[in-house]
Image: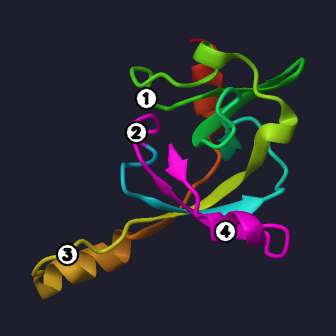
Amino acid sequence: MPELSQETERTKTLLPFGAAEVTGPSMVPTLQHGDRLLVQYGARVRPGDVIVLRHPFQQDLLVVKRAVERREGGWWVLGDNPYAGGDSTDYGTVPEELVLGKVRLRYRPLGSGRRSAFALVRWALSAARPVLPDRAASRRLRAR
């Protein structure tokens, strides 16, 4: 589940993009604990997209899940890690107005400590990756 800074929350109407940080294992292997996300607010959501939404019962809590399918009343969302929980299997369909945006990019921060030149190059080549929709995952998750 990501945490969004209050400043990002206030400026989302001015800028269509914001940042979030992943905490927890619910989206492993797609997202890892500590990953940073670039979120596009107000983007059109389609099945297979990774999205940021407000938790239906704790609306001050933001979560990252995969939109699986539209149902009556909103989106059915699931985490990519079936053992983590905390998705629509627990709280049902998420109303459309609780969906904030679509995750566009995942980047990993540079860890602290001494690093070799090789490690820095390897990090630079793998630190930022687009988070693409996974239509196959949407079909697979729908079967759960």
Q: Amino acid at mark 4?
A: Thr
- Residue 87 higher or lower than 53, as above or below: above
Q: Amino acid at mark 3?
A: Ser
Residue designated by label 2? 28
Residue designated by label 4? 8
The kind of secondary structure element at disc 3 is loop
Residue designated by label 1? 81
Q: Nearer the viewer, mark 3 or mark 1?
A: 3
Discs 3, 2 touching: Cβ within 8 Å: no
- Label whose residue precedes the other's in the sequence (4 or 3): 4
Q: How far is mark 3 from mark 2, CA to CA? A: 23 Å
Image spot of residue 8 (x, y percent): 66, 68
> Which residue sits at x=58%, y=64%?
5
Which of 60/13 is in front? 60
Q: Amino acid at mark 2?
A: Val
Residue designated by label 3? 112
> Which residue sits at x=70%, y=16%?
92
Can see residue 49? no
Q: Which residues are magenta?
A: 1-29
